[in-house]
Image: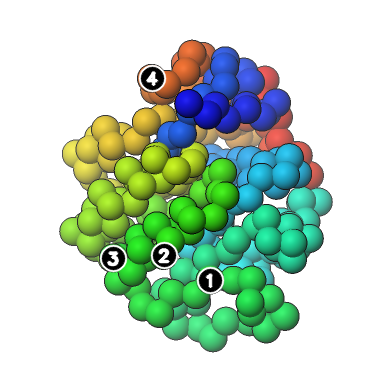
Amino acid sequence: MTLHKRLDIVKKLILEDYPNAAFLHIGPVGSGKTIFLKHLLYERLKDGFTCVYVCVKHSPKMFMWLMKKRNTDVEPYLKNGHLILVDYYSLKTGTPPTYSEYESKILKLKNLDPVEFSVMLNELRAKPIEFIYLDSLSDLFITYGYKNAMKFLNITVPRIRDTCVGAFALDQGIINKRLENYLRSIFDGIVEYKIVDGPNGIERYIRIAHFDLAEIDTRWHKLIIGPYNIEIE
């Protein structure tokens, strides 16, 4: 069984290397899920891994600009093939894609059918992919509706688990508690985020609430988001 090496940034959360798994990152809007996942992506790319990032919240061009803004430029990895972008955003919003210089490097959906989406991700399994990141499931539930979004997840999550490590973000409050609890049950790991009012303003916290495939620390840890980096205390 192949184990994935932990990044330094998560060593306070996951205490040993771990096998293929699918993680659900869940927390309120603004709790740091997206930035945390993007930093994980960047660190994996720096380590030489091939990663897939599904652009749901932003266009691929905006995604790359936001990454560069945080001093985590992913353009070199897109050019050398270690980063594979899937453009879900353009079809979802009906806006023409604006990445002519990267046309051959970005995968485009022909329609928003969840089966086509899952088939595309399944075809990527033929490549030596280590990690797949999707931000966010909230948009998928809004676009697809409950039934089709669940169809996508029931097909996709097991395939990712068989192939690599997957991370999916979900904003709390988008779906009801019953559905949220069901989602928690189909993922191997649950990463929770919260926001509290501290003496100096908003404070963000993160923890691994559940993960059976490796030893973890379930305590809440402070998540510090700086202009160019993140830190877990």
**Does dot 3 land on a helix, a strand or a loop?**
helix
Rendered image: mark on residue 107: 1
Q: Amino acid at mark 2?
A: Met
Q: Residue sitting at 63 percent across and 77 percent down? A: 104
Determine if residue 85 is in view: yes
Q: Quadrant of residue 13?
A: top right
Give the Cα distance between marks 4 and 2: 29 Å
Q: Secondary structure at mark 4?
A: loop
Mark 2 or 3 closer to N-term? 3
Is tag 4's residue or tag 3's residue first in the polypeptide sequence?
Answer: 3
Upstream in sequence: badge 1 or badge 4: 1
Q: CA–CA distance between discs 3 and 1?
A: 16 Å
User: Mark 1 falls on what kind of element?
Assistant: strand
Q: Inspect the image, locate mark 4, and give the three-letter code of the amino acid beneath it.
A: Asp
| Residues tagged 4 and 2 counted as in contact (Cβ below 8 A) | no
The part of the image, by quadrant, that contains residue 67 is: bottom right
Q: Which amino acid, by three-letter code, is at mark 1?
A: Leu
Residue 199: give x, y in percent of width and height.
Answer: 65, 24
Q: Which mark is residue 115?
A: 3
Give the mark nearest the N terminus, 3 or 1.
1
Sequence order check: which comes first, mark 4 or mark 2?
A: 2
Between 44 and 48, which is closer to the camera in this rendering? 48
State if disc 2 and disc 1 touch (CB < 8 Å). Answer: yes
Residue designated by label 4: 212
Does 231 sit above or below residue 158? above
Q: Looking at the image, is 188 positioned above or below residue 84?
A: above
In the displayed structure image, the side of residue 120 where residue 195 appears, left or right:
right
